[in-house]
Amino acid sequence: MLRSGRRLPDRLSRAVRTAPALTLKAVAASHVGKVRRHNEDYFLIVDVTGTGGRVRPAGLEHRIPATGALLVVADGMGGAQAGEVASAMAANTIYAHVAESWRDGGRPTPGHLRQCLLEAMEIANREIHAYASRSAGLNGMGTTATAAALLGDQIHIGHVGDSRGYVVRGGCAQRITRDHSLVQHLLDIGELTPEAAAVSPHRNVLLRALGPRPQITVDLSEHCVRSGDALVLCSDGLWSCVAEGELAHIVTAETDVAAACERLVALANERGGPDNITVLVARFERARRDARIVPEAEAAAITVG
């Protein structure tokens, strides 16, 4: 730590000021699984500093600046096609609000980005609830949503439900979200062991989701990342079948993020694929010092069709 009034040597000061920015390579994959008839999951990878909203094919790798990247995984629920509607509404409403705020205010401060993410998820909740209230057959529809907004080497997470976020570093996965589920609550109060939780008949009971109620409490958190780290967002169709250690091993072993996604989805399906399976993997790297990293001319978005 520098003492008050001390300055960095000029050479070190220049190195700090010119440190290459983080970029990310991101891919998401989604599969209906082996049991469900419809895929109610939805994912989004976008550079909110861009303009437009061009949708690109699923499975395509994107390299974009970390600052301004928005990554979302949502897992819908409800009868008929209610889950598909809710998850798509959530992801695209969050994107629209964050992108509009970024364009209007320029690069935000961390505090502003947190507030923006909170507002975006609250708006999504209200819009889904209102849509269901006036649409026959969609009453009670809802969705999980885990959204990661990036600013430099900081990930800002907004989270509701039981889709999960992990940071993988050095071969280990750290979960950075907490499930809003009955099973998680029973684990927290000591009424269930982890072994009992894994086979509980109440595993799919959510205590919090976007849409069912007019008001929602959103979990917000911040996490630092560095070059070589990977961020994984996934629906419960993945994490319920693939253990945390297995996830960390595959993401670490596969330098190709698309291959990592494919292996994770395939493993969940090998184990029965009881639910829709969605996984998004983003690996962080430092840009070369001679590389010019600029926002994409258009939003680099992937959605599940």
Image (spheres, grey):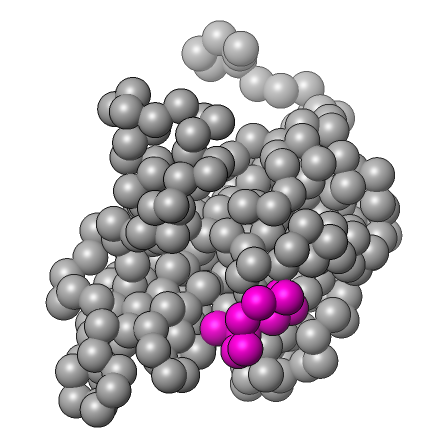
* Residue at 29 percent of width and 21 percent of height: 190
Q: What stretch is highlighted in magenta?
A: 31-40
Instruction: Let me know if residue 159 is in the magenta part.
Output: no
Name the one closer to the observer, 279 or 230.
279
Instruction: Let me know if residue 37 is in the magenta part.
Output: yes
* Residue at 34 percent of width and 26 percent of height: 192
Name the one closer to the observer, 274 or 252.
274
* Residue at 22 percent of width and 72 percent of height: 140
All told, the count of numbered labels is: 0
Tell me where residue 201 sits by quadrant: top left
- The prevailing secondary structure element of the residues shown in magenta is loop
**Above or below for 303 versus 245:** below
Q: Can residue 204 be seen in this view?
A: yes
Q: Where is residue 29 in the image (x, y as percent from the top left)?
A: 68, 65
Q: Quadrant of the C terminus?
A: bottom right
Q: Is residue 280 visible?
A: no
Q: Where is residue 194 in the image (x, y as percent from the top left)?
A: 45, 26
Q: Position of residue 126 (x, y in %)?
A: 20, 72
